Image (cartoon, rainbow, N blue to C red):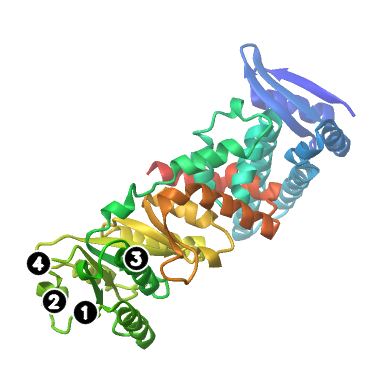
Amino acid sequence: MSIQQFTGSSMSQVLSQVREALGRDALILDSKELEDGIHVSAVAERDSHELAAALAEELPAKDAAAIPTELIEDQIAAQQAITAAAEKLTRISDVSLVRDEMRSIRSLVESHLAHVGWSETSLGSPVQASIMRNLSALGIAPDIVRLLVEQIDIGKTIGNAWAAPMNTLMQTLPFVTAVERSMSGIVAVVGPTGAGKTTTVAKLAARYAIEHSVDDLAIVSLDNHRLGASEQIDSFGRIIGLPILRPTGDRGLEDIADALTGKALVLIDTTGIGQHDPRLRQQLARLRVNDRTVRKLLALPANLEHDAMQETATAYQASGLFGAVLTKVDEAATLGAAFSVILRSRIPLAYVADGQRIPEDIHAAEGRKAWLVKHAIELMRARETTVSERYMAENFYGVRNQRQAEHDAI
């Protein structure tokens, strides 16, 4: 195996030297722009498998995955496919077919460049690569992985690619401070159908009744469309000796404004509305009681798929939110999607709900930040999650990464 060095005044000049010396299938290992010109390290295609094996042998066992042979093999395959496509292009006369082949070549080139970029990161900063891989294994979206990595001092994390990113994650997640003291006034629990709104209202009401007095509490139900929800909240009301209030007139909450006067805490169980429902904004706007402020608490199910969770958060955030209750944590396969949506939307977490028991299974989120991160790691280990190098290359150095960066800059 022979790694050769090439120098020239421009990249095109250097690449011509590489092709002449090693053939058109040569693998570019490194390129640098220095004062005296462009420097490139390259190896012939026939030596690339030997190079991959040598690199793996030089690394400690725990870091061997940082530079897997699959990346080098993918690069070789991409280069060969690009060459084959280009040769095929010269034999096509139909313009539409040429256009299709050009798109195919572009896709191959983009994939190849992505793998080269990720290979350079793995070689140049294996600790950073490990941190990015670990955060990705938790199910955290690529744009949030980049956000977290930017806040980490990579030089101080050598030997432990878990502690620093987990601490950064805990410090970056937004929380409602001293939420127990701020639970007063009128609070409406909003969210899509099945998000756990009714159970959340019951848990919060039970906590308040235990710590304060049921006489200072009122529960309002606006969810009159689902029989099961009505029975559930009515049953809870009977248990604590508190009748459930329901507006019957056209003015909504204003019809029962007098009954809410003097109550220290009013909890409203709202109708479930999907994030795509055109009535969403109108229904949320009707949550008002004369001149009193109605604060909205979003019930956000942790077991939702990432995109559906983001759409839900975005749709409800437009109406103004006091915070979020992360519900169904006990049913989630991963917390990465929830972390990503909360960090991207900057909706502060107020409570975490991890079961059906009332009121035991709801907790102030600020005091559970370490538990949340620990639970996310436990879920990852239970799933035996592995993140492929192809995923890392495509999401952090491919076209997806570029498009996401452009989106973030808007």
The amino acid beneath tag 4 is Asn
Q: Earlier in the sequence, mark 4 or mark 1?
A: 1
How far separated are the C-alphas under marks 4 and 2? Answer: 10 Å
Q: Which residue is mark 1?
A: 245
Q: Earlier in the sequence, mark 4 or mark 2?
A: 2
Where residue 348 appears, as percent x and y from the top left, is 36, 51
How far separated are the C-alphas under marks 3 and 2? Answer: 21 Å
- Residue 242 in view (yes/no): yes
| Contact (Cβ within 8 Å) of mark 2 with mark 1 | yes
Where residue 18 appears, as percent x and y from the top left, is 77, 27
Where residue 249 appears, as percent x and y from the top left, is 13, 83
The amino acid beneath tag 1 is Leu
Q: Earlier in the sequence, mark 3 or mark 2?
A: 3
The amino acid beneath tag 2 is Ile
Query: On the picture, is 280 further left or further right than 199?
Result: left
Where residue 66 appears, as percent x and y from the top left, is 73, 39
Q: Which residue is mark 4?
A: 290
